[in-house]
Each structure stands twice: as structure tokens, then as C-alpha cells.
Image (cartoon, rainbow, N blue to C red):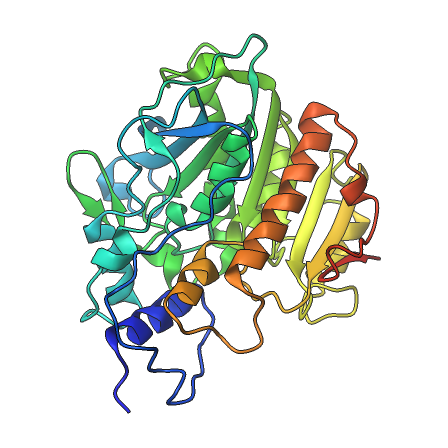
Amino acid sequence: MRRTHRAVLAATLAAIAGVGITTSPAAAAPPAGPTPQLTLPAPTGRYAVGATELHLTDQSRVDPWMPESGPRQLMVSMFYPALLPVGPPRQYLTPQEAALVLTAKGLPGVSPDVLAATRSSAHEGALPLPSRHGLPLVILTPGAGMPRSILTGLAEDLASKGYVVADIGPNYETYGLAFPDGHVTTCTLACADTTEPTVGLKVRIADTSFVIDQLTGPTASWALSWLIDPTRIGLDGDSVGGYAAPHSMLADRRIRAGVNMDGRVWTPLPASGLDRPFLMLGRESERTPTGADPTWPATWTHLTGWKRWLTGADFAHASFTDTFVLTDQLGVSPPGVISGVRSMELTRMYIGAFFELTLRGCPQPLLDGPTAANPEVKFWP
């Protein structure tokens, strides 16, 4: 049976996440109807969410992936608590970015408009909520090839709870990255299957520290940098971003707390260890003490500060991102994977609790151990 446009797009989104979809003929052909408006779950905090885009250039270093392009450039999506939900909705992806991602995954015939028009809750340029003492900053970094927008659901939720969030789009490390002047870059060596993950570790570390420089202190270039309390900075990376998270903390002591969301830690931590709070949050199928990934038990022994190791039952590698929220709405779900809405709910819940504890000092019983309300989440060891 020929797959419909909706089924093809759903398979495409799963391919973006690195998770294959196997469907029966019936599952591959959802009920006929208009193409749906993809929508992310509303944030759970009490504040409206504002957003703005930053184009940053690091004049101190040449881009390591494309030296002929000149200084290293990044696009960063900023999310923050707003006074009112006023202003145009934030664009999830540009059509050019969506088209490049789809082409990279071998489906150039699929229209990018549906993915690009995903509806979320942030409003461009909304007036920020005033803060007397500054707000904690959380930096998000996506996996290799992934657009930074794939972490929008988490970013908006944190902003709705009173955090400033910087979602980094690393240049030449995503299949499509659009800049304000209209030019769009693509992934180079950073996304090649033959590239060793360790090659890009120094790049991710440098990117993170540079973004902190640009958002705090005397070199701050963001107009709303006054919102940020520079003494309360957290870092949360997905996949390759998660791999880089503990190493970024070792390189930059301004980062007080960090999270690895399902990233294999290809480079071991030094024997001296990491002495600040760290959360390892992964899929149960691989990230257990006796699972397929031996780097997590090795990392655990080198975390000398407050730490937690959690896994989600039936989570896939992409379950910590927006991916399955979108594929579920298209009527085609990967078999055996927890629903996108539930995985996002749990991700928001535990990441939010971690930063409430480590950046705000608010006790979080949720992190003390398993709870009957969340049977999917297991604590190790």
C-alpha cells in the first residue's frame, strides 16, 4: 500500500531522531484528512514565554569544521519568562532548514512546510518579566545533526518556570542552520558517519563557554542579559550534547549543574572527577549499570558531587526531544516506544526538578527515589 504524505513525514521525523519506524500497511496509512497542525504541549509553568534569536560570532577562533568560512558563528534561541503572551509566535524551523533536514534523511520530496510550521508557545520579542535578583540560566545543546528547535518543548517549559534558556545551534553541526542574512549552512564532517565523536568535543566545550561569555559579564551582547544571574548556570545536553556536558563543566566552573540526556560518554572523565551536581537521564534499554553502554557506569564512578542516574522504560534515543510528540500527532508511532506526550512530561518533570534543586536550592522529593506516579522512571544504582 502506498504511504500517505502524513505517514512519510512521520517516518521522516523518526529518521531525524535516529530511530527507525516499522509499520504494518494499516499503520502506514492513517485516516484520510487534512494535514495536521503539529503542536507542542503547553508549558507547565505559570509564566508566558518570550523568545528571540541571537547570531553570535566568536572572533577569537576560526571555525574548526569550515576554516575558510572565517570566525566561528552560532545561532542561539533565547527563551525567557514574559509578562504577557504577546507577539508573533516563534518559528519552529525555517522552510529552508526543514528542507535540508528532510533531504539529508533521504526524503527530499516531502514538503517541509508542516514540520517548519510546528506550533509552540513562545512569542517573539515579548516583554520580559522583571527580575530583582536575576534568573538562573540553562544552556541546551542538541545532538549531532539535530536542529536546536528539537529541544523547544523543554526550553519553553523551563522558561515558563522562571529560567532564561539558551538553546545553541552549532554551525556546520546541523543539517540546516539559517542565519539572519538569509544564508543557510549545512552539516560538514561533524555529521559524517565516519567522524569520531571525540573530534567535536573541544568544539562543543568552546561553544558553551563562548555563549556564557556573550550572555553574562562585561562582554554580554544580548539586550536582555540583565535578566540572568551569572552565579546560577546549568547545562543540559542531548546525545552528543550530553556527552560534552560533563567535560564542559570541567572546563568552565561557571557551570554549576549539568545533565546528560542519553549521550554516550566517549571520552572518560579524569580520575579527579567532577565535583558539581550532575544528572544522567537515559533510556533503560542501554543506559543501566549492566546495559549496552559501559561509559555510563564509568562516568558514574567519577561523579563526586550530588548525582542521580535515572532511566525511562520504553524510551528511545529521541524520547528526550520533541520528536515523538510530533510523530504521534501524525498517526504513526514507533512500536514499543513511550508516547511523545508522556516522555516529554517526564523529561520536563525531572529536568525541572534537578535545576530547581541545584540552581534554586529548593528541595525536590521527586529526586529522592522512585514514585508510584512515575513507574517508567528507575533510579540506579
Residue at 16% x, 42% y is: 183
State the image coordinates of residue 304 (x, y, percent, origin top left): 81, 40
- Quadrant where the N terminus sits is bottom left
Q: Within the image, what quadrant is residue 11 found in?
A: bottom left
Residue at 30% x, 36% y is: 89
In-image side of 75 versus 342 (left or right): left
State the image coordinates of residue 364 (x, y, percent, origin top left): 77, 36
Viewer can see residue 78: yes
State the image coordinates of residue 338 (x, y, percent, origin top left): 58, 67
The correct choice, above or below, for 67 with respect to 126 in the image is below
- Quadrant where the C terminus sits is bottom right
State the image coordinates of residue 299 (x, y, percent, origin top left): 73, 52
The correct choice, above or below, for 372 with respect to 135 in the image is below
Residue at 23% x, 38% y is: 179
Q: How many marks?
A: 0
In-image side of 156 versus 275 (left or right): left
Residue closer to the observer: 63 or 334: 334
Q: Within the image, what quadrant is residue 298 found in?
A: bottom right
Viewer can see residue 246: no
The correct choice, above or below, for 95 with respect to 334 in the image is above
